[in-house]
Image (cartoon, rainbow, N blue to C red):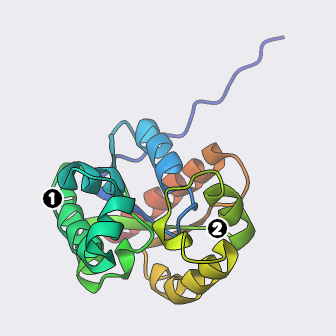
């Protein structure tokens, strides 16, 4: 008795940069790395690129210069990254909120909102202490307020994928399937 495995469905070729948006803890970096590996393209994390450009950490940028200065640096870094060869780009939770940044993302990439429920986000962000926006009060209250403000804007992303407590591989598969459909529709 032989068992044959079905060949994997062909992966879509990345026709443009794939930008992941969503609240902190949605899985943009973790899922983004796996997505890039699956698609055979590079991965970039906007927050890491901002820290490299500034020469200091994001919490230090917030402390020394404030959020407006951070957002301006973020806008510049993302704009530069969008002009590079197609790759997967994880953005900070507030990046898509900036009108100019969002317009650049919409014009030059496929945007994917990783939508996660608050309890999942709380569990994930509780693992790290590098979230400046959560240091000013109760994390759940802050996340709920951010969700109320940001979810209507995140909904403007090209694709929405649920990033719940399941396996990251399932989220990656959902993104790949949605991207294939998206690119077929936009190029058809």
Q: Nearer the viewer, mark 2 or mark 1?
A: 2
Instruction: Identify whether 33 is placed above or below 2.
Output: below
Q: Residue 76 location, x and y as percent?
A: 17, 67
Q: Which residue occupies 59% across, 86% down?
A: 145
Is residue 185 depicted above or below 167 in this figure?
Answer: below
Is 5 displayed left or right of 65 in the figure?
Answer: right
- Image coords of residue 9 (percent x, y): 54, 40
Q: Residue furthest front?
A: 64
Return the residue nearer the eye: 2 or 38.
38
**Percent x, y for residue 95?**
35, 72
> In this rendering, does residue 59 appear at all?
yes
- At a point 47% along the width and 67% down the height, the residue shown is 132
Q: Considering the image in quadrants, where does the C terminus appear?
A: bottom left
Question: For the view shown, which residue lies furthest in the right direction?
Answer: 1
Q: Who's the residue at 53% across and 65% down the image?
A: 24
Q: In this image, 63 relative to 52: left or right?
A: right
Looking at the rendered structure, the secondary structure element under dot 1 is: loop
- Identify the disc placed on residue 83: 1
Secondary structure type for disc 2: loop
**In percent of the image, x 50 and y 52: which residue is there?**
176
Q: Quadrant of residue 140?
A: bottom right
In the displayed structure, does residue 84 sit left or right of residue 4? left
Note whether residue 188 is visible. Answer: no
Q: Is the residue marked by circle 1 packed among few (<14), some (14-19), or many (20+) residues within 10 Å?
A: few
- How busy is the neighbourhood of tag 2: few (under 14 within 10 Å), some, or many (20 plus)? many
| Mark carried by residue 29 | none
Of mark 2 and mark 1, the one earlier in the sequence is 1
Residue 33, by quadrant, is top left
Residue receiving disc 2: 116
Label pair 2/1, CB-CB below 8 angstroms: no
Q: CA distance from mark 2 to mark 1?
A: 29 Å
């Amino acid at each position: 008795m032989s068992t044959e495995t079905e060949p994997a469905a062909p992966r879509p070729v990345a026709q443009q940069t794939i930008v992941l948006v969503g609240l902190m803890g949605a899985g943009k970096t973790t899922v983004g790395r796996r997505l890039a590996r699956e698609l055979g393209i590079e991965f970039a994390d906007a927050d890491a690129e901002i820290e490299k450009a500034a020469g200091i950490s994001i919490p230090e940028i917030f402390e020394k210069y404030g959020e407006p200065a951070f957002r301006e640096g973020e806008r510049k870094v993302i704009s530069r990254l969008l002009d590079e060869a197609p790759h997967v780009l994880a953005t900070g939770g507030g990046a898509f909120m900036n009108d100019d940044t969002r317009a650049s993302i919409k014009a030059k990439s496929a945007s994917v909102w990783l939508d996660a429920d608050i309890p999942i986000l709380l569990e994930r962000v509780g693992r790290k202490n590098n979230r400046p926006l959560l240091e000013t009060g109760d994390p759940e209250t802050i996340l709920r307020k951010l969700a109320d403000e940001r979810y209507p804007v995140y909904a403007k992303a090209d694709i929405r994928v649920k990033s719940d407590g399941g396996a990251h591989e399932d989220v990656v598969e959902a993104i790949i399937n949605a991207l294939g459909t998206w690119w077929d529709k936009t190029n058809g």
